[in-house]
Image (tube, grey):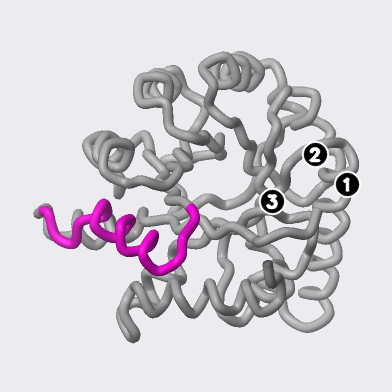
Amino acid sequence: MSSKLRLGVNIDHVATIRNARGGVHPDPVDAAKLAVKAGANGVTAHLREDRRHISDKDIERLCEEVDKPLNFEFAATDEMLKIAIGHLPHAACIVPERREERTTEGGLNVVNGYDRLKPYVDALNNSGIRVSLFIEPDPIQIDGAKALGAPVIELHTGAYCDAKGSYREFELARIVAAAAHANDIGLECHAGHGLTFETVANVAVIPTIAELNIGHFLVGEAIFIGLEASIRSMRKLMDQVRPA
């Protein structure tokens, strides 16, 4: 399934900077529009229970003002499901969430959480929203996502990005195998979390991965080179190893 690799840009931490002062600048919706201009195929935003970065108004404006698909990340709660169905984004990625975590710490356990997650997956599917589940690169979890009826998975790449030396090769091999397994059983495979200029190429080259979602690094790099340049550089690295 080798084709042009899509890039989704997560604009959560533009909102984090805005919220640090409690004002309106920088505007994450403006960042989303700039991301599209720089080569993003879509925009990702995680509306957390505690609203620490993205706000309800941000989601509303992203749906109204950005002409590329919105990937709406959220935890499996009734409140978030109601918001998703109310706005009908292109995609909804269910992620694990703990109030005390700084960032998403790992993938969903979709096998043990089948009974809890099934109603949310069904409701999103029935609303015409493309459902994805954020999981570890583990074939058991991938099979669990298939059983839940999700057409898409997103592999957590954090362990690969954090690893050093031979451990990184081991984690990369897990991602390669997981993406191949997802493709074999008919799931579209995405990947993300922690990817940088240094680590992206080895994941981008995997032909059975259709989309990468990257955010924190791009916003951080924007401090030094600007957001548009940061995204264009990431897009270039992806295209070098996965030309159309």
Residue holding disc 3: 155
How crowded pointer 2 is (Cα within 10 Å; few <14, some 14-19, many 20+) is rated as many
Residue at x 83% of width, y 36% of height = 186
Residue at x 73% of width, y 23% of height = 148
Q: Which mark is residue 129?
A: none
Q: Nearer the viewer, mark 1 or mark 2?
A: 1
> Earlier along the polypeptide chain: callout 1 or callout 3?
3
Residue type beneath disc 3: Leu
Q: Which of the 4 image quadrants contains residue 146?
A: top right
> Earlier along the polypeptide chain: callout 3 or callout 2?
2
Count numbered badges in the picture: 3
Q: CA distance from mark 3 to mark 2?
A: 9 Å
Are dots 1 and 2 in contact, CB under 8 Å?
yes
Residue at x 46% of width, y 49% of height = 101
Residue holding disc 1: 181
Residue holding disc 2: 142
Magenta segment, which residues? 24-41
Residue at x 60% of width, y 78% of height = 237
- Principal secondary structure, stretch drawn in magenta: helix
Q: CA distance from mark 1 to mark 2?
A: 8 Å
Mark 3: secondary structure: strand
Mark 1: secondary structure: helix
Image coordinates for residue 71, horizontal then vertical, percent: 48, 42
Image coordinates for residue 222, horizontal then vertical, percent: 34, 77
Closer to the camera, 236 or 214? 236
Q: Is residue 82 above or below residue 93?
A: above
Q: CA distance from mark 1 to mark 3?
A: 12 Å
How crowded pointer 1 is (Cα within 10 Å; few <14, some 14-19, many 20+) is rated as some
Mark 2: secondary structure: helix
> Earlier along the polypeptide chain: callout 1 or callout 2?
2
Q: Is residue 154 above or below residue 90?
A: below
